[in-house]
Structures are given as C-alpha cells and as structure tokens.
Image (tube, helix red, strand yellow):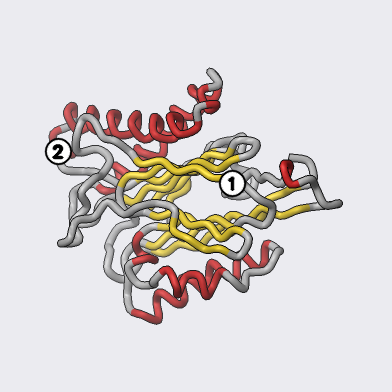
Amino acid sequence: MKGLKTIRAFTQEKGALREDQEDFYGVSDDGRFFVLADGLGGQPHGEIAAKLAIELSLMTYRLMEYRRFYRWRAFFVKQVIKKANLGIFKKVRKTPELLGMATTLVDLFLSSKQWTIGNVGDSRAYILSRGNFRQITVNHKGGSGVLTKVVGLEKKIVPDSFEGQIYSGDLFLLCSDGLTDRLTNEEIYKVLKSCGQEKEDLEDAAKRLLFSANKVGPGENTTVCLIKAKEEGKLLPKWQRQSLELHIAPGKKLKILPTS
C-alpha cells in the first residue's frame, strides 16, 4: 500500500421519524474490514440486533483473519454475515422477549488488490470509480416494500457478495436506508461527483448528502460513510493502485460506533 492513503468522513442522525437510534457500524483494527447494520424499524429491539451484528461481525473477522481465510474473499464476507445471523438467532432462542428482532448488514473487505462486499437487507454500498458511479448491492425488498431477507430471523441465510478491483481515487459509500429512501442514485451521484481529494471535501459531501435528504422531508435513522482512496507521492504502476478503506473515530480501534 505504499504511496496510498485513505480519507474518510461520516455523518449520522436519529431522524424525526424514529425514537431510537438503530444504526451501528464498526471497523477492524487493521483497517481492512468495515460493517454497517440497520436494526429493523417497527420490530422490537432493532438496536440490540444491529449492535450485536456489528460485535459478532468484528469478532468473526478477527478469527478468520488470523487463520488467513480472507484469501477467499467472497466466502469471507458472506461467512461473516452468516455467523452474525446465527448468533442473533441463537440469542433470540435463549431470550424469548427479543423475538422478532432483526437487522440489515452490509460489509466491506479490502485485500491488496480488490474490494469485496457482502450484504443482506437494504443497506447499500456504492462505488464511484474513474468517473463511473454505481450501486453495488442489491436491495432485498419485495414489491410491497417489505424486506425479503434480513439477519437474525432465520437460522440460515444466503448473503450476496460482489467483487472488484481497487483503483486510486475510488470513492465508496455505505449507507442505511434513511438516505436512499429520500434520495435517488442520481441525486447521490450529483453530490459525490464533485467531491474533492481532501478530508474536508469528504466531510462536506457527507453533510450535503444528509442536508439534501432532509430537504426532501423528515427521515429515519440515517448513516453515511464515505471512504476515498488517495494517491500520495509519485504515480504508481497500475497494478499497485490499491487502497485500504476504513472509518474509525480518532484513536479508537475495534470500536462499536453507534450513531448519535
């Protein structure tokens, strides 16, 4: 990763339509794994499900990274989600008052040359790479708007996974549906396409995304995480144009970060 660094920014709010904060996210101490969970609104104990999903994901990552399972990237990101799902399912079995709790989950893993993303639910991942902006994840929603796949309700699930090559300058967005329920992909792109190269630029873009969403109307819990790969020093050969993406509060490692 010589010659590259990452800059990142985030913004979050509880939203006028929710009494509790049910979005959580976390990052591994090596800066290669990032995860976001949005507890199901309208269901009991969504915040417990989301926080537990983050804790279990980070724990599974540490165990699997230690054993070098991350070499099989698609298997890796899906297995993290499966372990979180099973852990929540077992928690509910032992604690009947938690019956019905569930969450979405989207995770991002970065190896030396590629990004890999897994997801269940409707929390999304986007990439802006070399001028091309696209949604990576697929929403697990039926025609009525009800989620067709979530983490925690069933003993077994089948997560989606996606892979791609990392280039210097790539910008990733992970977000909960508090943003995407109010902004279209085109509206999100309009904000991100003019994003500069410095941390202040990302912070401004994150705030403008939230501001744009609030102009549409009041929303639910909203989490926006931006991670940009930035080239530093002399131009690298193409095969070396890679990045590590992370988002962590200053001075914190392996910290569960609730929205506030």
Total labels: the figure holds 2
- Secondary structure at badge 1 equals loop
Q: Position of residue 217 (x, y in %)?
A: 33, 79
Q: Position of residue 201 (x, y in %)?
A: 65, 68
The mark lying in front, picked from 1 and 2, is 1
Q: Position of residue 132 (x, y in %)?
A: 56, 63
Residue type at tag 1? Leu
Question: In this figure, which residue is indicated by the disc labeled 1?
Answer: 246
Quarter of the view holding residue 195 = bottom right
Question: In this figure, which residue is indicated by the disc labeled 2?
Answer: 97
Residue drawn at x 62%, y 47% as measured from the top left: 166
Q: Quadrant of the N terminus?
A: top right
- Secondary structure at badge 2 equals helix
**CA distance for labels 1 and 2:** 35 Å
Q: Is residue 109 above or below residue 204?
A: above
Q: Is residue 165 left or right of residue 16?
A: right
Residue drawn at x 71%, y 63% as measured from the top left: 198
Quarter of the view holding residue 84 = top left
